[in-house]
Image (spheres, helix red, strand yellow):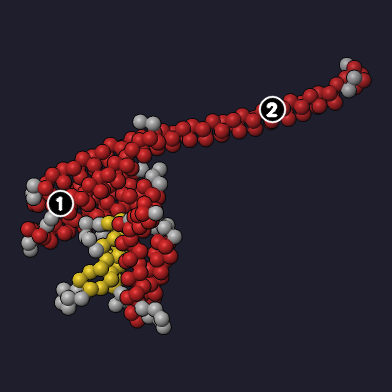
Amino acid sequence: MPDIRTIRQKQKELIHKLIAKSGLDEIEWEKTAFPSTFRASFPTYSVSIALDEILATGSSEYVCYIHDASGKLIDRFSHADLAALNRLGETSFELMQDLYELARRRALGTDQALDDLLGQIG
Amino acid sequence: MNDFVGSYRLGDWASILGLTVGIVGFVVTIWNVIKSKRAALSAERAAQLAQNAVNRSHAIQDLSAAVAMLGEIERLQRERFWSLVPGRYAALKLLLISVRGSTPSLTPRQRSVLQNTIVEATELKQKIERSRTSDVEQLDPAALNETVTRHADKLYELLVSIREKIGA
């Protein structure tokens, strides 16, 4: 059984890989029934990135959810969970914010819309 | 007699003939074995292709049923029959898991489409069940149905692509 630090490192690696692949348009992000949650599905797993409200404090946190082949939630971690692995010049908040923005823009087609609009305006 | 056999070296010719017949027989046997193996492999491939076609046919039927289920869920949500909705999402999820498991010829992309709807169905079922115990008025049928329609469209596209593959 891996220790918590190893688990967090793997989770952080997942975020990095999702950002890299999303930047290359190799991951298809989709809207979900929850307005601040976007999901990418693979043959037997799904990964969601969400901007969730923390009811107790009224603040927000970026959260990553992983669902298995039967739709069951099997992992959940927030930017705060990854904070212990922060290095100089990089915070887990910014990392997951980047992923959220990428996912949101891909799911909503924002970049394509901008390109089309720029083309139409001339 | 012996002189006759010896002078015409009939023994040698008999040996050569026997060896030739043996070699030819051996080659023919090997050739027949290869032919039989090829025939068996062809039959196995044909059987596999037939099985794939049957699986795809079942997948088409099940996906049609899934699209119909989503239509029913839309109606129930529109009419706010919330008590009936979670069960429909659960049934939909099981149907899609079955399609994925019994159709080995699905591409990774097609499996991902099914996975996406399976997770969404799970999440929506939980959302509605939670709301039923707190405040069902917070559920927005229009927003939920926008999601349902999106998934119905994706499943229908999947159904069409499978149908095209078997020429149905």
Residue A99 in view? yes
Would you say the residues marked 2 and 1 are in contact, meaning their CB atoms lie under 8 Å apart?
no
Whether residue A36 is situated above or below residue B35 in the rendered picture: below
Q: Is residue B89 above or below residue A95?
A: above
Where is residue B63? Give x, y as percent. Answer: 28, 41
Q: Secondary structure at mark 1?
A: helix
Question: Which residue is nearer to you in this view: A98 or B25?
Answer: A98
Disc marking residue B142 = 1
Q: Where is B25 relative to A79, above or below?
A: above
Labels 2, 1: one chain: yes
Q: What SS does tag 2 mark?
A: helix
Task: Give the residue drawn at x 30%, y 65%.
Answer: A49
Identify which amino acid the numbered label 2 is placed on. Gly
User: How far from the left and from the top, in percent, is residue A66?
Assistant: 30, 63
Residue tagged 2: B25
Residue at left offset 16%, top offset 73%: A55
Q: Is residue A106 left or right of residue B8?
A: left
User: Whole-Å distance between the Cαs marked 2 and 1?
Assistant: 79 Å
